[in-house]
Every structure is written in structure tokens, then in C-alpha cells.
Amino acid sequence: MPSTHDWSQWQELPAPDNELDRELLRGDPRALILRYQPMLIVIVKECVKRRMFSEEDVDDAIQSLNEHLLVRLDTLQGQFTGAASVSTYLSAIIHNGCASLARRRAQERGSTMLSEPVADPPPEPDTADTLKREIRRFRGILSISIARRPRMVLCLKGYYRLLIQVGQVEILYPGKELPGATLMQYNQQREGVPDMELYRLLATLLNSLEGKNNTPDALRKWTQARLEEVILLMNAGFPGARYDKESLEALVEDFFSPFLEREASI
Amino acid sequence: MRHRPFFDDASHLDEEGVALATDALLLGKSEALPGSVQDHLELCLRCKEELASHYSLALDIRLRPADPHPYFDRAAAPGDARDGTGSLYRIAALIIAALGLGIVGYFVGGEIQKKGGRYAGANRSSRDTALVHVPERPLTSGDTVFAANFVPSPGLDQLVGANFRSEQIRILSPPAGRTAAGQPVLFRWTGRAPGPVTVQLLSNTGKLLFERETPGDRIEYTGRLIPGLYYWKLVGREDLLAAGKFTVK
């Protein structure tokens, strides 16, 4: 393995080439690990940002992770089915390795976390790139649960009392008859009514779209539970709590805003 | 040798399972994930967290999945060494399809009862029984009897018989054994669930074929099922209450 003391030059991930990666995994896994040294270093740097390691631990972490990969060469070759990208597969192994290493280091130091948890503020969307990435993260997290996604989207909009567009309902529930009167009533009254009335309107809307008979209170509890889950997932892997219900609202509004623009132009 | 792909010995997503799901999120192809992985992610918060954490990292380091992707683009990958093999698979599938049509015709041909679109008590949901009419549709080339129709789904198998809720919902029907093709399927259970429950019928690949809510303790499905292995779920307002499976021969 190359010296890692001057890892600052290893900034760029290798160009993706899955066929080459699979050949290396089969025939020369050490060469594969060498090819992905830049990614390993980038991941360790990200773990420093996430306060899993300190700057002083980086060289040791890189060395330990390389030893970990070398030890696992046989299992890597035997277990990998080829369904995932090799690069993503390696990144998952390295990420897990970082987490294990961070836990071991923390235990050795007699604490459960590298540093005390601080309620970090959510990332400031002061650059288009940051906002785009956060929206992409939010979209991905909504997509984890395919079956519940349509209802989650409408319930999130309802929780934050956002406008629900006709076009959006048509996309989420294709082929379903649109309860136009209920939707109009929700959009007209969403900002001023108490929670129970809001959830009554939402329940009527969703029951019509899904052929169910949920009560407003059941829907309210379901929405609360899903919102807490989304927040948990948005904060996953980061120290402290970056998002809470209030700070998520701005991201939710930004996420849904393209629909507003599209419908306004019709 | 591992028990099943994408899962570790503790039945959680292994590193390749997390990697495949991460690729799916990066490519916007979550709906194309294997049914076992989708089912597991619906239920397992721990794996959802692990996936969310890794997906965030993948975004932050600007990780790019393979293009074409070995799983999500496997049918259309140009220059893929499997293209030739794929042609052989297609020929084999056509031969099996032709044989299967003959078998389906033998089992089902004389059994189909045309209902002419009239409802037999549809939407009548009582405490005892809800008869559900499913409109007829003609057989297509996809409705042939493949051996694949009987292959168990690991993700759904792990749900069958598991304990879910303190209400002790117990499945009475259908039994896990064979059910004759063309016969109605009665879904029946004991135990109290808070509020109406929904019966979902799924194919062995996890595809949702039918669902209906009822305040009662049974639903009879009168639609036509081609021979194969089927799973079904009893879903409460917020949780999965029970799961079962049966075969149609």
C-alpha cells in the first residue's frame, strides 16, 4: 500500500469502470483496493466531518481500513453477486469499517461518542449545490418506502399545510378518480383550520384515493410517526440532530416548489 | 455459502444489499429493487437508517453508480457479454411458455366462469363475509405456468408465521397447502385489530395483485388466480398484523 501521509493529493474518486472493477475483484483484489484508495481517503475525510474521527486519527484510520480490506479479500470475492456497482459495494464496506473503527476508538477512550453530541443546525442552503444535494437526499429518503410514498408525500404537505396540486395527486395516484371538491376545500382552508379539521380533510382525500376508511386521528398519528422517521433518516450518520420538524419545513417547501411553478404556468 | 443474496445471517441487509439500495436511490430506481429488499425496507428501521446514512455519504462524496448498471440496466446493457446468453434464455422461455400455455389450458380452460362483469356482493362488507368481484381478463402470454411462479420469496417467507402484534391475530384460512385453481379463496382470521384491516394479495415476486379493506374478519376472493405461489398480508392502520401464503395448483 502507498504511503498515506500525503493523502491530500488523493482528492478525486477513480473514474467509474464497473467491468474493470469486477475483473480486478475476481483476479487482483489488491489492485482494486489500490485503485480505490482515493475513495477510501475521501470517505475517511467525510467521517472526520461527521465527527467519527479526529484529524489526528486519519492516518491510523486509513491504515486500519486497508488492513481490514486485505483481510476480507476472500469474503469480498465469494459473497459479491455482482448486482451492485463495485464502487458502491466497496464504499459500503469502507463506511461500515469506519463506523466499527470509530466505535472501538470511542470505547477505548471511555466515551460512547467521539465528541459530545451537539444539535447541529441544518446545512445552510447558501449555495445551489448544497440545496440541490439536500433536496436529493430528501427525495431519496422518501423513496426508501415505495409503497407508502404517495401517502407520505400528501401527509407531509398536509402537516406543513402546503398547497396540494391537482397534477401532483395525479402523479402520485395515477388512474384514480380525483376528489376535486375535497382537494379544493383543503387548499382553501389549510392555513386557518385547527389540526383535527385539517386531518379530517386529508383523511377524506386519502380515503377516497386509496379506498380506505381511516379516521382523522389515525391519520394524524400515522403522519407524526412518518415525519419522525423522515427526520431520523435525514439525520442518520450525522452527529447531533441536524433536522427537526421546524427546520425540515424549509426543505419540504423547497422540495415541492417546482410543482407550484409548473401548475402556475398551465 | 450464504443463505440468500443481499441479506446477512441476521436477516438484515448485508453490504451488497445496502450498496444495491444505495445505487437504486442514486439512480431513482427504488421500485426496481428486488421484492425481498423492498419488503425488508418497509419493515426494518435499522436497515432504513443504515441505507439513509450510506446514501448521504454517497451523495457527499459524489459517488457514481456503474453505467450501465449491472442490475437495473441488465436487459439493455450494450456490449454486455450476457447478450448472447440472454438470447438463449429468451428462446428457452418461449419453449417453456408454449408448454405452459398447454398446461394452463388443461387446468383452467374448463374452469373459467364468466361473470359478465356483474358484482356478486361486491362492496358489501359485513361482519361475516365480503365477496369481492374481480373483473375477468383474457389470459396473456405472461400468464403461463413457469416454475418461477412457485419460487418462494425470501423476504415474504420471513413474514409468514412471524409474531407481529399483541392482538394475536391468527390466520384460519387459506391453509398453506394447495388450493385448486378456479376456486374462490377465503381469507379468514381470528383476533381483534383496532379498526378496519386491509387484505393484500401478492404474487411470489411481491407484486401487489389485489387489496381490499374490511371491518370484518374475512374476505373471499373470487377472481381467477393462475397456478403459482401466493402471499397475503393483513394490514392494520399502521402495522402489518399477519402474513400467510398458499399455492394454487
Image (cartoon, rainbow, N blue to C red):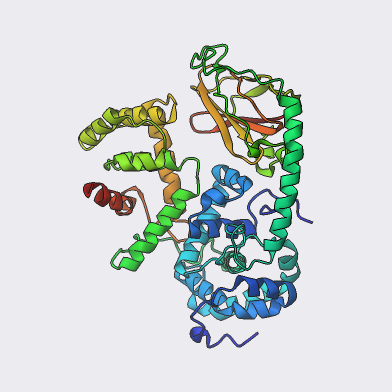
Viewer-closest of A29 and A68: A29
Viewer-closest of A53 and A196: A196
Which residue is at the far right? B1
State the quadrant of the N terminus of chain B: bottom right
Q: Against B122, is A47 above or below?
A: below
- State which quadrant residue A28 falls in: bottom right
Q: Against A139, is B39 above or below?
A: above
Viewer-closest of B153 and B53: B153
A193 sits to left or right of B205: left
- State which quadrant residue B106 falls in: top right
Q: Position of residue A45 (x, y in %)?
A: 49, 74
State the quadrant of the C terminus of chain B: top right
Q: Position of residue B170 (x, y in %)?
A: 66, 23
- Does the image show residue B9? no
Q: Position of residue A74 (x, y in %)?
A: 76, 69
Q: Residue at x 27, y 50 (%)?
A: A262
Q: Against B80, is B1 above or below?
A: above
Q: Residue at x 57, y 42 (%)?
A: B43
Q: Position of residue B59 (x, y in %)?
A: 46, 65
Total numbered labels placed on residues in the image: 0
- Does the image show residue A189? yes
Q: Residue at x 39, y 25 (%)?
A: A215
